[in-house]
Image (spheres, rainbow, N blue to C red):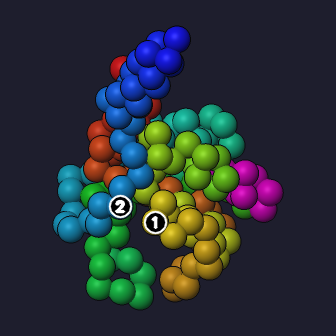
Amino acid sequence: MRFALLFAFITACLMKSVHSCGCEYNFATSCSDGPTEGAKRLAKHFTERFGGRTEIYNCRKIEGSSTTSLHAEGRAVDLYVTGATGREAFDYAVKIACSNGIQEAIFNRRIWTSELGEHDYKGVNPHIDHVHIGLNKCGAKSFGAAS
């Protein structure tokens, strides 16, 4: 009995590691040629669920900084929804983050990362008219892909 439970636990952990991207943070370093396939699928998934419109690729720095934006690598989606719908989309992104390669979510002056959890966002853009969802490199390849 104990062996069967242990085997089931180990199998579940191995399966999760095979199919999960985690939520490790990968900084952007340069501009790519456009949006990643994972970001396109994330945008479709979130608009089907929450409505709104999305933007992905933009070769630029983070507003007010010298750091390359995840949008420059095509790994971030801005979902244009506000109010309660925006908060629901933010919460949903956090809920599915570590199994889908989501490394950050920002909305209404709040940010979530796996390292720090949810906390105040001090960036120049307060993200009050959209939810920003950033993918790590694994999520940028595999979000929503068939297994």
| Residue lying at the far front of the rendered structure | 2
Image spot of residue 20 (x, y percent) = 39, 36
Q: Residue at x 48, y 60 (%)?
A: 114
Q: Is residue 61 left or right of residue 143?
A: left
| Label 2 neighbour load within 10 Å: few <14, some 14-19, many 20+ | some
Give the structural element (helix, strand or loop) at label 2: loop
Inspect the magenta stretch and tell me whether residue 88 lies in it. Answer: yes
- Name the quadrant of the C terminus: top left
Residue named by callout 2: 25
Residue named by callout 1: 115
| Residue lying at the far right of the rendered structure | 84
Quadrant of the rendered image containing residue 117 = bottom right
Image spot of residue 13 (x, y percent) = 41, 30
Q: Residue at x 36, y 41 (%)?
A: 21
Instruction: Between residue 12 and residue 36, name the one nearer to us.
Output: 12
Q: Residue at x 29, y 39 (%)?
A: 141
Inspect the magenta stretch and tell me whether residue 110 lies in it. Answer: no
Q: Residue at x 34, y 69 (%)?
A: 69
Image spot of residue 140 (x, y percent) = 33, 45
Magenta: main secondary structure equals helix
Hey, what amino acid is under mark 1?
A: Glu
Q: Is residue 62 left or right of residue 109?
A: left
| Label 1 neighbour load within 10 Å: few <14, some 14-19, many 20+ | few
- CA distance separating discs 1 and 2: 9 Å
Against 144, is 140 above or below? below
Q: Please report the bounds of the magenta region as a residue range.
A: 83-89
Hey, what amino acid is under mark 2?
A: Tyr
Q: Is residue 29 visible to us here?
A: yes
Q: Is residue 8 visible to us here?
A: no
Against 33, is 67 above or below? below
The mark closer to the camera, 1 or 2, is 1
Q: Are marks 1 and 2 in contact (CB under 8 Å)?
A: yes
